[in-house]
Image (cartoon, rainbow, N blue to C red):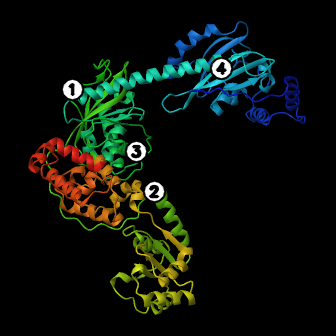
Amino acid sequence: MTTTEESPARPALASLRQARERFLTGRPLPDGVPDEVVAAWRRARFFGVPHDLKEPAEPVPPVESALLTAARPVLERLAPALPSGQSSLVLTDERLRVLWSAGSTPGDEKCRDLSEQEVGHNSAALALRTRRRAEVHGPEHFLDLWQDVSAVSVPVLAPENGQVLGTVTVASGLCTGCTPHPGAALAEATATAVEAELLTRSRTAERALLDAYQRAAARPGAAVVALDLDGRNRLLSGAAAGMLSPGAVEALERTAAVSDSDRDRDRTGQDQVQDQVQDQVQDLAGSAGDLMTSARDLTGSGSDLTRSRSGRERARSGREETRSGREAPAAETYGSGSARNGTGAAAYDLELPDGAGTARVTPVRHQGAVIGVVAVVEPPVGGAARPQVEQPRVALAGRSVPWRHATTLATELARSREPLLLTGERGTGKTALARELMSARGEPDPLVVDAAEGPVGELGRWARELAAEDRVLLLRHAERLAQPDVAGLNSLLDEHPDAPLLVTYTPGTPPGPCLQRLLDTLAARSVTLPALRERPDDIRKLLPELAPKPAPGRPPLTWTLDALRALERHPWPGNVTELAHLVRALAEQRRAAGPVRRAELPDAVREGPAARQLSPMEHAERTAILEALRRHGGNKARAAAALGIARATLYRKLRGYRT
């Protein structure tokens, strides 16, 4: 929507006209000329715009666009409301090309492009730049032929994302009162009506896509995905959310983005498009990108429909596997005009990455144009046992704000060889970060001393010898240091405050006076690592780093959207270490093919944390119910029968654990 704002006060037109003449002749300007007007005149001179434009510009043919199609009936209906005499109503696109005009004002036949590069300062260019109503009067214009013209322009915004699509301008003879322009209300009403028409047409296309999705999802348990061509809408059934990995969803998004003209080629051309899509799938198979938002919007594995709006920027990672698209034998389309009629927009099969199965992709048509696709996914048949794989490596992946803040600060402090303290809950990656900092600095491997394994001994002597050898001492679990060791470390720092020392500390019980003194000494050069529950956005980055390297010929471990959502909601008391153990156990023990599903996760992760503190009896009940559900594959009726309770009772107890 557009908003009406009170225009700022302007200087008298006579004095402004004199100022413009002085500007054109290169003389100094008087005081009181608005800075924005002077800047606009200077831009026009920089662009080489002649103020005495005489020759008509080359005619620019009207550009047929969705904006003009939607606006034409509105403009034709409102044009009779123009005041009699010299007045006009003009529509431009986002490049300020005139798409439609009615009425008559000076310069109409010469100015079919209202950009500042062509005609200098004007209300349409100002409205486009400021995204709100703008007025320009008489001598504020740069062109001579507009010195007796006043104009008001209002931007037309896309109803879906607020992007400026163009402008509506009402021009008339010079208004002596300047503001507000008498045509301001008409310009506002026209822009609002055009935006409403755009919204109506957009909703009609969305309805066609939704209808096609509902027809495909009518079969119980069908895994269906619907995507539009411009990436604004995505619909997933509950079965699809539980089956597809982010890489598979991204492959479908990419094939939906293939233009209608590409689909309307002959059979050979379509095969080439399929090959291109499959090549792109290889690049996108391991990326999660912005699917975080979509995954969080999912209502769970039992949900029927999920809708999200998100951008289309994606992180990419390479893949070695090859995929092949297959032309479907039958021509199918959804929506109006579904017969081929020479368009060639036929359904086709697409093999999805991550072993997610095969998708039957069918274009959706509306008013003769392809507006999106509906994909019905069939799971892979069978699955081979996963061989034993090597152990995972430690990962420090993450892009969340808390993690980037901590690691950036640690990197800055680690540039010096002075002592550094890393604190955080157990399993947050303190030791891994310490090793990474030393590696980035080009240091040799540090000497690691773990206070949790027993008394440290002569810590001061070790630190002095390591300093002579140009090595760093990494002291783990400082909270477990014995009293003599803490005293020795304090003495060392008193004598050598710049000792090459890295210390990790896990807060717990209140420290004693001696340990507190040590922490206070190191506080000025300390970094606290965030817990994993404080940076759930990083879980998708951590998973591929924590996963073991697959055996030759085997795909890497991937995850369905439902499984990722469950991982992101888990509190992870053991932080990254706990997540690494889970990933390693799944990689070594699972026998199913394809992405890891939510049902394969441990009960505590799959069901999510209880929303309130449970009593010991409730804990026992919940554990028994979850075990019964696991034994019966999630079938609540069978689980209730095995527990000897009614199914309604089981549902009530599960709801009670979450309230």
Disc 4 marks which amino acid? Thr
Question: For mark 2, what is the residue?
Answer: 399
Q: Can residue 598 be seen in this view?
A: yes
Q: How crowded is mark 1: few (under 14 residues within 10 Å), some or many (20 or more)?
A: few
Please tell me which of labels 2 and 4 falls first in the chain: 4
- The total number of labels drawn is 4
Q: Which mark is residue 293?
A: 3
Image quarter for residue 12? top right
Quarter the N terminus occupies: top right
Please tell me which of labels 1 and 2 falls first in the chain: 1
Please tell me which of labels 2 and 3 falls first in the chain: 3
Q: Please tell me whether residue 517 is drawn above or below residue 219 in the rendered image.
A: below
Instruction: Say which of 477 and 280 sits in front.
Output: 477
Question: For mark 1, what is the residue?
Answer: 330
Task: Give the x, y percent position of residue 29.
Answer: 88, 35
> Which residue shows up at 16% across the image and 44% down it?
636
Q: How far apart are marks 3 and 1 (CA)?
A: 36 Å
Secondary structure beneath dot 1 equals loop
Q: Please tell me whether residue 505 is drawn above or below residue 185 in the rendered image.
A: below
Disc 3 marks which amino acid? Thr
